[in-house]
Amino acid sequence: MIQHGAMNLRVTVLSIIAVVALCAVPWRASAQYNEPLLGQYYEMPAFYNPGAIGLSDRIRVRAGARLQWIGINRAPVSVIGTADMPLKLGRRRMAVGLSLQQESYGLFRNFTGAALVGYKVMLLGGTLTSGLRIGLLNQSFRGSEVYIPDDDDYHQSDDDAIPTVDVGGNALDLGLGLHYERRGWYAGAALLHANAPTVSFNSEGLGSGTVNDSRADGTDDSTAPETTQYYEFPVDRTLYFIVGGNIPVKNTLIEVMPSVIAVSDFNDFTGIATCRLRYNKLVSGGLSYRYREAVALHLGVELKNFYAGYTYEYPVNDIGRASSGSHELIAGYSFKLDLSDKNRNKQKSIRIL
């Protein structure tokens, strides 16, 4: 909960996370990780579902940024990129793609890079794509910048459960997904972080006084250096469901484009319901509701192969007392890459004797 006042605005999101999440378990740190839920999820479905790739005959590139809770110090900032394309290997219909993410919130930093591969089959008059995501997750924590508020003063943390040096690590990150589309409608489900990865690392010289070493496996080793401590950043398995479609309005150039995304990490739930109108496949606009968090305005422009979209979210929970809202911008480009022989320039060489 965030309240008004200059003092509270100076308290970073990290301080809240550190006190609540890290102090609960001595010697082992734990922090939640989830992908940023974009308001324009419908433009970057491959970020949430590895099966949502190669959905057209074009190479499709999207990049975006989300600035969350403007006005709150060190609120989340996310930069995301996706690219995908169809691929035909003999009679097999495949698809490949990439997904990149860089996110910062408080003193935490997350980076994920993943390769996506999909296999397509015809089913009930539509196309079903099964996808696999293989990625590397990097998490870091700038413990050297931790300062805990104490009345009107700030002091560096003296809690042994909170790192006071910069730490970080990597872990293999896997995901699975299915995507089905038919006659302008689509639906998909994905399980990200399917292997429940845990980023583990240790740091030296933490804490004060004499402490006992505790390893990440829960065992103690009295012969280990007394200043060595072990930390873990577990990542929960996360389910994503997306459904949506295009409904042409008869005798007009208008399309109604409803969509819904639902997210659960088996402990909590959130989601976004969106309804947009698109005119002449050129301009679009609409509204959405983020469950218990915000209402949003969406604007988009499509010009030939280019796309640009903007979303403004106004919080409807307690965060709205300290924030002026969240902003999101996505831009993209799509193009064909035809390597078939019929489209290659063929030349004949004539030898003159």
Image: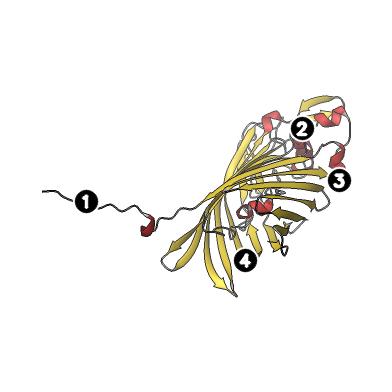
Among numbered discs 3 and 4, the one appearing first in the sequence: 4
Determine whether, in the image, residue 319 is placed left or right of residue 43: right
Query: What crowding class fits label 4: few (fewer than 14 Cα within 10 Å), some (14-19), or many (20 or more)?
Result: many
Can you tell which of label 4 and label 1 is closer to the viewer?
1
In this figure, which residue is indicated by the disc labeled 1? 349
Residue 348: where, in percent of width, then height?
24, 53
Local secondary structure at mark 3: loop
Local secondary structure at mark 2: loop
Q: Amino acid at mark 2?
A: Asn
Residue 238: where, in percent of width, then height?
68, 56
Q: Which labelled disc corresponds to residue 181?
A: 4
Q: Is residue 137 above or below residue 71?
A: below
Q: Which quadrant of the figure has residue 8?
A: top right
* Residue ID at (49%, 53%): 336
Q: Which quadrant of the figure has residue 14?
A: top right
In this figure, which residue is indicated by the disc labeled 3? 317
Among numbered discs 3 and 2, the one appearing first in the sequence: 2
Q: Amino acid at mark 1?
A: Ser
Among numbered discs 2 and 1, the one appearing first in the sequence: 2
Local secondary structure at mark 4: strand
Q: Amino acid at mark 4?
A: Glu
Q: Residue furthest top?
A: 153
Can you tell which of label 3 and label 4 is closer to the viewer?
4
